Amino acid sequence: MSTLKTQSYGQEMCRALKAELSKLGSLPITWFTLGGTFIVNLVLAYAFAKAGLQGLTSLQSTLEIGLASVSYSQAGLMIFGILAVCSEYTGGQIRTTLTAMPRRGIQIFAALLALTVVFIPASFVISASGILLTQSLYGSAAAPIVWGDLVSAMLGVSGYLTLTALISAATGIVLRRMLPAVAVMLGYYFIAGPLIRDHADFAKYLSDTAGVVMWFPPSDRALTPVQGGILLGAWTLVAVIIAATVYRKRDM
């Protein structure tokens, strides 16, 4: 009996995941937001590369310069995560979704898993584009990038962007409205976070600072990339659990 129940849950999860992936693929905001983020990242990477060529930045290696734009273009993935979940509440779409998938626990985890499937390749492509552009602009003046450093940085930045975007999606699930969720996430990551980082020792354990060391370790090595990844993963898990709990207990 338990085996049949497990199969039932597994089959329902697979159907829910396919439905969520199909939904993401059909949303215009998916392509507009991801495409816009890619373009913005290239523009920022170009600006950082030009500044590096003119000696106007403290960054040394082309790898660091190529990934510097991620600190700003990450906003695009955050906004996409929020838009994807908040779009359910536009025009009462959430009622249709819950009618088709009444088990809220399965539906919400399928939605977040579908977003993860999109975030991982999108994060890799966006971050890699900055490195490739920087390398092409530097040409023969660029120092060779060590393969091990490149792999480590790409894994770190892709993981950071994916987990941060999932936190944004979880925030959108809790708040249900796009503008408040965007204000909370961007306000923290671009205003409150940097201020706290400069004035509090505990800031290294917060999601933004802990996550950054995954791909851009500070000179003082306050945390290792692995420690930063574990901490950011823990923050993401907490955010997802809170979002799922609120979602299941809410009337609609």
Image (spheres, grey):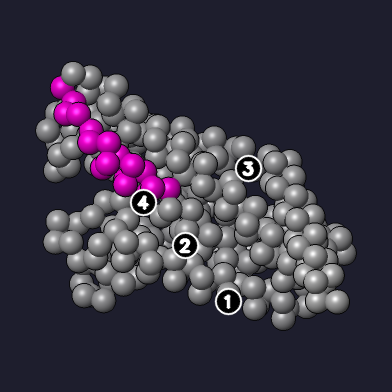
The crowd level at tag 2 (other Cα within 10 Å; few <14, some 14-19, many 20+) is many
Report which residue position mark 4 lands on. Answer: 156
Quadrant of the frame with the C terminus: bottom right
Residue 234 position (above or below residue 116): below
Which sits earlier in the primary sequence, circle 3 or circle 4? 3
Q: How far apart are marks 3 and 4 (CA)?
A: 24 Å
Contact between labelled residues 2 and 4, with CB atoms less than 8 Å apart? no
**What amino acid is at disc 2?**
Met
Residue at image position (16%, 29%) is 143
Which sits earlier in the primary sequence, circle 2 or circle 1? 2
The crowd level at tag 4 (other Cα within 10 Å; few <14, some 14-19, many 20+) is many
Expressed as whole percent of the image width and height from the top left, the position of residue 58 reads 14, 43
Quadrant of the frame with the N terminus: bottom right
Which sits earlier in the primary sequence, circle 3 or circle 2? 3
Report which residue position mark 2 lands on. Answer: 185
Q: Which mark is residue 30?
A: 3
Residue at image position (39%, 35%) is 128
Q: Which mark is residue 242?
A: 1
Q: How far apart are marks 4 and 2 (CA)?
A: 21 Å
Residue 216 position (above or below residue 64): below
Which span of residues is magenta-colored?
141-158
**What amino acid is at disc 1?**
Ile
